[in-house]
Amino acid sequence: MAFTAQDVKKLREMTNVGMMDCKKALQATDGDMDKAVDWLREKGLAKAAKKAGRIAAEGMAYATVCPECGVAAVVEVNCETDFCANSAPFQTFVKDLATVVMKQNPADVDALMNCTYPGSTLTVAGILPEKVMAIGENLQIRRFARFDANTSVAYVHAGGSHGVLVNLAVEGDADVTEIGKNVAMQIAAMNPKYWDKANVPQADVDHEMEVQLALMENDPKMASKPAQVKEKIAAGKLANFYKENCLLQMDFVRGDLFTGSVEGYIADAAKKLGVKVTFVDAVHFIKGEGIEKKVDDFAAEVAAQIANAGK
């Protein structure tokens, strides 16, 4: 598999490793980006890969909870410009869609399009062209999620760059909104790959073990140790893997409130309220996550216009 200079640049951005080492990694792995990341980690050059490929697109990720029924929804709608995303008509449209999700419980986006739009006899599909005409941009209803059990808490970061729903099981009578919001802020800030170490697929655990063992093979101080010893050391290092990737095992970022893991914070905060709180689930939408956005090269465009003007 061939690779380009752009691939080298992308690998460097993912790993913070020098360009020449990134080039060597791609050469050694025949241009396979994921294998190149592992190659760098095994050589001790990269601790972990940054999440890449999440080029921002405009729009809004919005989360809310119905104050009457407790049903919660998070939706993402995309538009073309941040000017549109910050406009009242667009934000009202997004919030109306969240209401549709909460009240009409569509199974997917196609079903959502057939739901009745609030304050209208038209469906969402019927109202969408009107909204496009009125707002003046192409609008895409991308995704949504819904919780209708337990206690949900919504959090919207930076006007819609992140929308988070946290679902908690509560034993006792207390307002756990602050707990849910602090956990949601942790999710928005750290974007954990898994909620709990129990959720990590065995294939991912095995893969991490392989990386740690390969890392020791490339360490002169560790390479001579017996295989059983290396396996025990690698297994011990899984705790760090869980701490970096799993929400409940992560260090709680609000050190002013609690020192320890997120799981520990939830238990401590719940105890102070006289209740028991268990994290059940969460949904985290990042605006434009994974959407390729066109990037205009203004300098090249001007140069081309100057060249054409001289003809």
Image (spheres, rainbow, N blue to C red):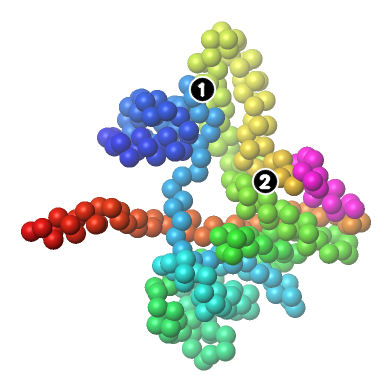
Point out the stretch of residues depicted in magenta.
255-272
Q: Quadrant of the C terminus?
A: bottom left
Local crowd size for mark 2, using a 10 Å CA cut-off: few (<14), some (14–19), many (≥20): many
Residue contact at pointers 1 and 2, CB within 8 angstroms: no
Local crowd size for mark 1, using a 10 Å CA cut-off: few (<14), some (14–19), many (≥20): some
Q: Position of residue 298 (x, y in %)?
A: 30, 56
Disc 2: which residue? 247
Q: Amino acid at mark 1?
A: Gly
Q: Position of residue 177 (x, y in %)?
A: 78, 62
Residue 269 belongs to the span the image colors magenta: yes
Q: Residue at x 35, y 55 (%)?
A: 295
- Asked where in the image residue 200 lies, by quadrant, the reply is top right
- Asked where in the image residue 171 lies, by quadrant, the reply is bottom right
Horizontal side of 274 relative to 145 (left or right) equals: right
Residue 160 belongs to the span the image colors magenta: no
Mark whose residue sits in front, 1 or 2: 1
Element assignment for label 1: loop
Horizontal side of 87 relative to 35 (left or right) equals: right
Disc 1: which residue? 44
Of residues 170 and 93, the one drawn nearer to the viewer in this rendering: 93
Residue sticking out furthest to the bottom: 121
Q: Principal SS element in the magenta part?
A: helix
Q: Residue at x 10, y 58 (%)?
A: 310
Q: Amino acid at mark 2?
A: Leu
Tell me the distance, in whole angstroms, between the alpha carbons under discs 1 and 2: 25 Å
Horizontal side of 74 relative to 79 (left or right) equals: right
Element assignment for label 2: helix
